[in-house]
Image: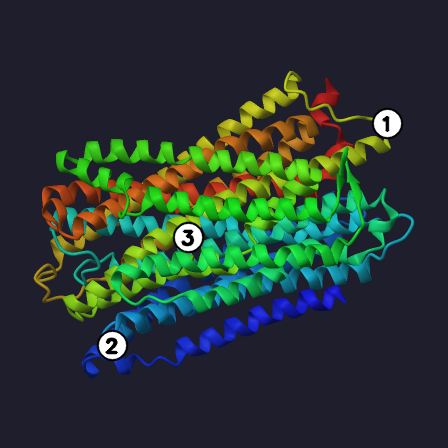
Amino acid sequence: MIESLIIGLGVVALVLALVFRQRVLAVRVEDGAANPEEVSRLNEIASAIAEGAMAFLKREYTWMSVFLIAFGAIIAATTGDHGVHTAIAFAIGAATSVLSGLIGMKIATKGNVRTASAARQSLQKAFRVAFESGAVMGFGLTGLAVVGLALVYLGIDVLVPLSSTITREIQMEILSGFGLGGSAVALFGRVGGGIYTKAADVGADLVGKVEAGIPEDDPRNPAVIADNVGDNVGDIAGMGADLFGSVAESTCAALVIGAAAYAVTPEAAKNVNIILFPMLVNGVGIVASLLSLFFVKAKSEEKVESALKNALIVSTLLMLAVLYPVTEWAFGTTTFMVGSVRVDSMGVFIALATGLISGLLIGLVTEYFTSHRYKPVREVADKSTTGAATNIIYGLALGYNSAVIPMLLIAISVVIGYVAAGMYGIALTAIGMLGTIAVGLTIDAYGPTSDNAGGIAEMAEMGKDIRKRTDALDAAGNTTAAIGKGFAIGSAALTSLALTSAFLTRATGELEKSGKTLDLLITDPNVLAGLLVGGALPFAFSAMTMKSVGKAAFDMIEEVRRQFRTIPGLLEGKARADYSTCVDISTKASIREMIAPGLLVILTPLIVGFLFGVQMLAGLLIGSLVVGVMLAISMANSGGAWDNAKKYVETGVHGGKGSDTHKAAVVGDTVGDPFKDTSGPALNILIKLMAIISLVFASTFANSGGILLRAF
């Protein structure tokens, strides 16, 4: 029965996504445009953005498929008797993640032009179109994750049925391949998409706004189409794949840890409600997210941001209310041991509630540090009056400071989760934090759709009044996007910790079969070495991705300067820019530059696990987690603050657009672009992907015993 309930809830999410899609497409561009000429301009610009986005994804997925096939073959060959089944789960997870990104991309490139057109009618209608475009992504991705996990589980239960040699642990380890597939796609989506969008954005800003003094999204700027394409491939497809991976991975981690506990608790092992409970939580979140949408209303420009935030708050409260009876129904009076901790229904609820509340608080803290309604961002804007240097100094300080409270919240969540339900509780805190993922993704995907709408309105010359409305939507979208990034990083931290816990659980079980133990004392040189190397990895990864953006941006800047210099009448608005060349520059650069960071993330746990063993790998995972989360939060929030400090100046303070203060703020925003949209978010994938690779290969690593260490 519970299997049908889970799949049914997932199908509800998919149906909702389809309904929202139809509502968005039912909005006619003609109804909001001033005249047929404006309709033609709007459709032409939107088509160019859509074509550029799909062309990039096609090329990215072509290269990605080569890697996925090769990695799938490695999984099949090296993960034991059931490697082929794990590889199949990996392929399904990857395909589902790709589909999630495509769904979001398709609707975003339809919703952007409709949002721009609707802005001529009213702010409320434009907001509704952008929000419902985001809802397609939010509910579609969540539905695919829930249905995909449930169907793969049922398939494993048929192909690899329980027996004297096949345990729940083996089944769940196979299922982890699904999460690995989703995370592998997310790696290239985040890195490749992030490099694409920021190469275009940096080039457009530095040459267009700073050097040429033309407005943002001005059609005279050759990089403007590539910039708008980048919003979709980075913040829609990339973010979608990232959070799809988080949902699948955190669920798999809880299933693996739970399976190990059930093995010694016959009563729990017979209760399928308990076994599949982590999947059910994801499904229940769909209902809470849907109900919260009725509280989302933006009656004025000042209310847009609070309307979006209300959706997250209400969905969290609704989820809290429904989780307790659901947990009681699933567990009843059944208890089981996870290590030395006895787990019951109350402990499970406490762990879930802790993650859920922590996720909301991290989002609110992120809002405080990245919205120009509050002191930190306004302080960055104030310091722009003395130049770009002081803007950057204060932006960096803001980012460092903003990482403290989220890390404390994550630490508190870990302690409470462990006390409540042991290692299983840590995994449940991650699932709890992702319980309202449908709403979280909705308000995140709303951001780039609104941003694109503003760009389209500017390029189509719809007028200052329309741009004022789209700017109000975009400013709120910047903050909600920052909240989404904070939410994604926080959930990535707990997901990575849950996966690491699941990896240690599986590795310990394998070692005990041969009479060995797993010693993780920090004084052990292998563990200490792993911690140090793991702590260095986020810096190496960030350096690679930042330089990649710099290289691609250099080529973009040179091309934009060349066109301004050589195309007669371009700056006067009498000639058309060559947009396609800039799109091609971003596409080629992102494909080329995403390979090295990707290999760093994928090969590191494989090399350390096979050559140096489980102890060093465990240290490496923890080291990369601690440093990676701090670095990711500080980079994402610095970038978000610089962006909104620029937008605050553009409201008219400190001289407004075109002033020296504005130019300094633009420089800060440009530095922040790869911080918040490339390196910072991509660190999520680094800490999660290395952890789930370790989990999938846990048995192999444990049995290899560290080939290099054994040789000495």
Residue designated by label 2: 121
Residue designated by label 1: 515
Amino acid marked by disc 3: Gly
Circle 3 SS class: helix
Q: How is the image coloured?
A: rainbow
Q: Is residue 62 above or below residue 7?
A: above
Point out the frontmost of discs 3 and 2. 2
Which residue occupies 38% across, 38% down?
635
Q: Are marks 1 and 3 in contact (CB under 8 Å)?
A: no
Tell me where residue 195 appears, x and y as whole percent: 38, 48
Labels 1 and 3: the sequence-earlier one: 3
| Label 3 to label 2: alpha-carbon separation | 33 Å
Residue 524: name its quadrant: top right
The C terminus: image quadrant: top right
Amino acid marked by disc 1: Gly
Circle 2 SS class: loop
> Most extreme residue toward the right, as rendered?
164
Crowdedness of circle 3 by 10 Å Cα count: few (<14), some, many (20+)? many
Is residue 161 visible from the viewing direction of this image? yes
User: Is 355 in front, or is 617?
Assistant: 355
537 horizontally vs 712: left or right: left
Amino acid marked by disc 2: Gln
User: Is 128 in front, or is 242?
Assistant: 128
User: Is 652 in front, or is 453?
Assistant: 652
The N terminus: image quadrant: bottom right
Crowdedness of circle 1 by 10 Å Cα count: few (<14), some, many (20+)? few
Q: Is residue 508 above or below residue 133?
A: above
Is residue 90 visible from the viewing direction of this image? no
Residue designated by label 3: 193
Residue 9: name its quadrant: bottom right
